[in-house]
Amino acid sequence: MATPLRAVPSRRPRLPHPHAALGYLRRRRIVGAPLAVLALRSAQAQGHWPNQPIRLLVGFPAGGSADIPARALAQAIGDTLGQPIVVENRAGAGGAIAAEAVAHASADGHMLLMLPSGALLLPMLRRSLPFDPYTDFQPIAMVAEAPPVLCVPSALGMTDLAAFIAQLRRPDHALTYALSGPGTSSQINFALLMQATGTTAVAAMYRGDPDMLRDLLANRVQATFLSVQTALPHIASGALVALGVAGETRCSAMPGVPSMAELGLPSVAYVPWWGIAAPKGLAHPIRDRLAVAIRRVVTSADFRQRLAQLGADPRDLGPQDFAALIAAERQRLAAIATTAGLKPE
C-alpha cells in the first residue's frame, strides 16, 4: 500500500506583508520626528544664543575678591554678546552653594559660575559634596590670580625671609602663625613653607581676616599669608613687613617683593585664581563664543587696572588650557591637602 504524501513546510523565508513594512516605516517617521524637532530647536537655540540675560553666580559676598573681577567682566562681556550679564551673589559654605546651583543648572549658556580655585579643595574639606568640581563644570576661561604675601608685624624686627626662617629653626622660638580658616591660602602656604624648610610653628585659627589682621598688627601672632588687597595699606604704613609672595612670579601691585620661587622655595606656591565655568555639556559653539568675549576683556588695560584694586593680575587661559589646569590640580591639591592636614568633615 502506498504511503500517503504529507505536505512539507516551505523552507523559503516568509516575507513581511507589504502593509506591515509600511507601518514600520511610518512608526520610524513618527518616533524620529520629535527627535528631529528637538535637534532643530537645539541648533536654533545655539544659533540665537544668548536670547535672555545671563546669570553669573559668585559664591562670596559683594565687594569681595571674587566679586570685583566678576563685575568687571560682566558689563564688558554683556556689551559684546548683546545681553546683560547679571552678577548674583550666593554666599555660603565656602562657595559651595553657588557652585552647586550652577552644576545642576541647564547647560544652555544662560547660567555661569565665577569658579574660584578654592572650589577644587571642597572635596577635601566636605564628605558629602553634592557635585564634583572636577567633572561637573565646563571650563571656559581662567581670568585672574592673586598671589598671597607672607607678612610679619614690623615690631618683630625682621626684614627678610631668611631671618624669619632662621628664627623658625631655633628650637626655643615662640612664633605663632595665623590662619583664617581651613583650606585657605594662609593655611596651605604656611604648611608648604614649614614642609620646605623643615620647621614647625604653632597655629592660631581665626574665623576671618579682620580678627586675624588685628592680632597680627598687635604682634599677638607673628605671621600669616594675606591677600595683597588686605596687606598693602599696612605695608605702606610700615605696620607690616612683606617677606615674599607665594608662587613663581612677583605681583604687579608690589613689584619690590620677591616671589617664593626667587627666594629658593618654589613649592610655596598655592596662588588663588578665578575663572568662568558653565554646567557640563555646554555646546562648544557657545563655549567658544564666551571664551572669545572673555579674552577681549581679560587682555584689556581697563580690566588690568580694576584687578589692581585686589593686588591681582589677569590670566588669559582659554577652554582647553583652563580644563588642563583644573585636571592637573586634582593631584597637586591632594598632595597639598595631605601636607596641610586637611580632612573632610
Image (tube, rainbow, N blue to C red):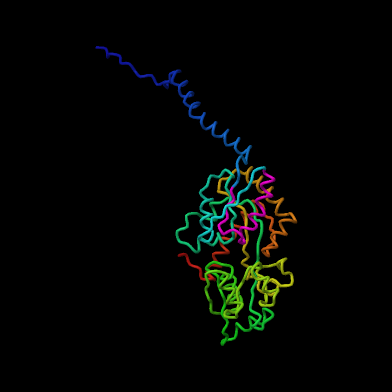
Q: Where is residue 184 in the image (x, y as percent from the top left)?
A: 56, 67
Magenta extent: 55-81
Relative depth, front residue between 105 and 281: 105
In the rendered view, does 251 fall on the left or right side of 39?
right
Q: Residue furthest left?
A: 1
State whether residue 270 appears in this view.
Answer: yes
Say which quarter of the image contains residue 169: bottom right
Quarter of the image with the N terminus in it: top left
Quarter of the image with the C terminus in it: bottom left
Q: Where is residue 324 in the image (x, y as percent from the top left)?
A: 62, 55
Q: Where is residue 54 in the image (x, y as percent from the top left)?
A: 60, 46
In the rendered view, does 250 fall on the left or right side of 221?
right
Who's the residue at 59% across and 60% down the image? 117
In the rendered view, does 307 fall on the left or right side of 129?
right
Above-or-below relation of 136 to 269: above
Say which quarter of the image contains residue 142: bottom right
Who's the residue at 69% across and 55% down the image? 316
Relative depth, front residue between 30 and 168: 168
Q: Is 225 colored magenta in this rendering?
A: no
Q: Is 67 colored magenta in this rendering?
A: yes
